Amino acid sequence: MSTQRSKPYFFLTRQLPLLFILVGTALILATVTSFASFEQQSVDQGKQIFEQKCIGCHTIGSGPLVGPDLKGVTGLRDRQWLSEFILDPNAKFDSGDELANQLLTEYNNIRMPNLGLSAADVDSVLLYLESSSEPVQPSPTAIPAVGGAAAGKKYFTGETALVNGGTPCIACHTASGIGPLDGGTLGPDLNRVLTRYGEPGLTAALTTITFPSMTGIFTTAPLTPEETADLVAYFKEINAQPAPTGTKTGVFFGVATGFAVLLFGLMLVFWPRQRESISDKLRAGKL
């Protein structure tokens, strides 16, 4: 009986190391597969973020646009610096970071906006940039080659409504020759926007709007290719005109001064009457 019992035990002890090896190999393969799958998901997520938020200003392998070409950037720059810069570019600019301010000078002093990405989002974008081997750029095929400046001005002022319901530019931006006050002040003056961005860069920036103050409006109401081309043509037209010499400060000052004079005149007329007592008015026969 003892001999019969010892045979299975002997078999198990001989095969146990092999069993451990097989189980360990299976676990390693499962871990590697899971990690590869997770990494691929991160790359795919990074591609989606890039196409939504970055492609308006950057290409991958097709040359600089509003910002630098990002082909091979993860090999050129320290990964930690890239992560910090993408996560909060303004912090880098404001801290006096030498590389950040070098880029600022090189690209027309246009600051990269804060894209509102999480640290995980930034990691996904960097993984995508590392994995990208084919040139990636905005497709120019959907954008008409020629736009109309007159139509662009109407889109700017809101005289012609944007097809998808976006807010007209004049609500936040100013440009010369569109009215007494030349538009809003929430956003920058657009008289020289073409000089700052260049025509391809401005077209790309309007096609894929990534500016934080604008994404809330234009994510669900993007400009059509025709609207983009017309607006670019309008900005090209005003860019060629002499720089405006007047400022809205003078207009506001004039309006404020006129209103103050009018108010003072009304006070001169009505204030003496307010100072008269009821008895004075009765004696004067005014009541």
Image (tube, rainbow, N blue to C red):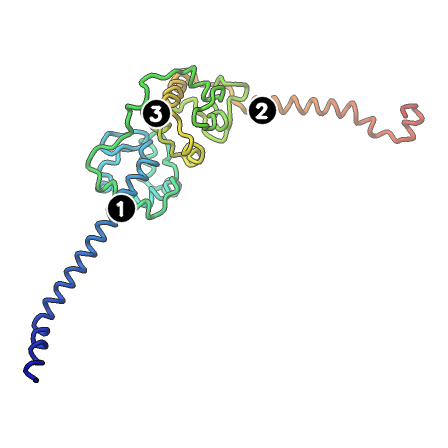
- In depth, the one of 125 and 27 nearer the eye is 27
Left or right position of 160 against 274: left
As measured in the structure, the alpha-carbon distance from the residue carrying label 3 to the one carrying label 1 is: 31 Å
- When the figure is inspected, residue 178 is found, relative to residue 24, above or below; the finding is above
Which residue is farthest bottom? 1
Q: Which of the marked residues, 3 or 1, is nearer the chain's N terminus?
A: 1
Residue 73, relative to residue 201: is it above or below?
A: below
Return the residue at label 1: 41
Which residue lies at the image location 36% right of the left edge and 23% below the top edge? 225
Tag shown at residue 81:
none
- Residue 135: image location, x then y, percent: 22, 32
Foreground: disc 1 or disc 2: 1
Q: Are marks 3 and 2 in contact (CB under 8 Å)?
A: no
Which comes sooner in the sequence, label 1 or label 2? 1
Rendered image quadrant of residue 164: top left
User: Of the residues shown, which amino acid type is indicated by label 1?
Assistant: Gln
Front-most of residues 255 and 146 = 146
Would residue 25 appear left or right of 186 to someone viewing this image?
Answer: left
Tell me the element at label 3. helix
Instruction: Tell me the crowding category of disc 1: few under 14, some 14 to 19, or many 20 or more residues within 10 angstroms, Cα based.
Output: few
Q: Nearer the viewer, mark 3 or mark 1?
A: 1
Q: Secondary structure at mark 2?
A: helix
The residue identified by callout 3 is: 203
Counting from the top left corner in percent of width and height, residue 4 is at 6, 81
Q: CA distance from mark 1 to mark 2?
A: 55 Å
Badge 3 vs badge 1, beta-carbon distance below 8 Å? no
Neighbourhood count class around disc 3 (C-alpha, 10 Å): few under 14, some 14–19, many 20 upward: many
Quarter-wise, where is residue 195 in the image? top left
Kind of residue indicated by mark 2: Phe
Tell me, for residue 252, which label it has, or none: 2
